[in-house]
Amino acid sequence: MTRVARLTAPPGSQSSLREANRARLVESLKRHGRLTQVELAGSTGLSPATVSNIVKELTASGLLHTSITSRSGRRATLVSLARQLGLVAGVHFSSRQLHISIADATRTVVSQTSLPLPLDHRHDAELDRLSILLSDMMESLGGSVSDLLAVGLALPASIDYRTGMISTPGLLRGWEGVDVAESLSERIGRPVYVDSEANLGGLAEAREGSARSVSSSVFIRVGHTISAGLVVGGDLFRGVNGKAGQIGHVTIDENGPICRCSNRGCLETFAGGPALLSLFPPSDGMQRLGDLIQAAEAGDGSSRRVIADAGRHIGIAAASLCNLFDPELIVIGGELAQAGEILMAPMRHSLDRSALAAAGGLPEIVGASFGDWAETRGAIAVALDHVTVDAEAMPFSA
């Protein structure tokens, strides 16, 4: 874990209690980004007076930054970590695209880039390329890779947290049997933290996006592959092997097509990108999901029908997920989410038909707040989660 400084005090002392309160406040800001002092009191359980005193001390020491904002027509003090604490990077390898963002401690992005990837990309070549790109981006900011506090990395497959490796064989060939975090860390000399793209997309939406106001949510990522991230109380639920949320491999038809996971009739074989594009002859020019969405938005009936059918299949799988997990909200992200209501309206219809009824109603289905960058923002969040910020050298009053 990257450490900016370290908190130490005799346990049980008044000084120890103050330091614990400061640490609780800082962790809340790392988790949520910017909060008002009233919101900080609610998220930390500390009294408004205690929060006000800590904010004044840490602002004077340079650890926090404050500004005046307006909430519900009233002036409020908005608090965040100070930008000068350092930079982190968020990286997302999807099946067909690489996204990189560099952000400061307030989660403000200071540099970002994206580029296409070959379909069957391999870890060695892509991590080499990523190392060069990170170096170039940091140099353009007047620094070097060694200035990064941490790097978060999203991959299109579930990760076993005990080993740091892909948890299920066959889902990301060219990356299997490799501790990806360690491999990248050896290249750039900085700590790296890896998780699945669905988990990190879900984390971003729960921390600062569409699902910020609910206690439990599901982020369903629909693109070349299909997967889900499950969030409870702002934290990810990964399962024992990191496989929780693999909705793309829910069986829709046990006699259906062979899936890349070696089973038959998985959701991906009906609603994943390759399955949808394969329904069109080569002469139609449907090479990527973007082509399909563009045609649907232009009114092409076949394209709209293909996307709507995918929405119905995803909705059936989402209904099973709701019956098991019972979330408050479902957020749809990934490339196919750009189809908007063409996809989500049929999803809602399937959910209404297939999910168990509830007194409070079924969860709402909404689009992701951050579009193509949701997973990268989640990677930034997980990098910041692993940066320890404290004030050992700061001049606090006793």
Image (tube, helix red, strand yellow):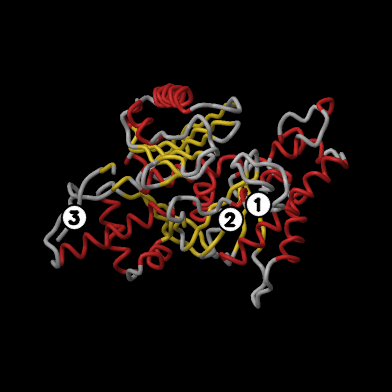
Query: CA gap, disc 2 to disc 3?
Result: 38 Å
Labels 1 and 2 touching (C-beta < 8 A): yes
Quarter of the picture holding the C terminus: bottom left
Q: Which residue is mark 2?
A: 210
**Whole-percent x, y for residue 194 in the image:** 42, 41
**Whole-percent x, y for residue 65 in the image:** 36, 49
Q: In screen coordinates, is 275 left or right of 3?
A: right
In the foreground, 14 or 49: 14
SS for dot 1: strand
Quarter of the picture holding the N terminus: top left
Q: Which residue is mark 1?
A: 367
From the image, state whether disc 2 or disc 3 is nearer to you. 2
Query: CA gap, disc 1 to disc 2?
Result: 8 Å
Q: Which residue is mark 3?
A: 396
SS for dot 3: loop
Say what amino acid the circle numbered 2 marks. Ser
Q: How many numbered marks have been drawn onto this rendered protein structure?
A: 3
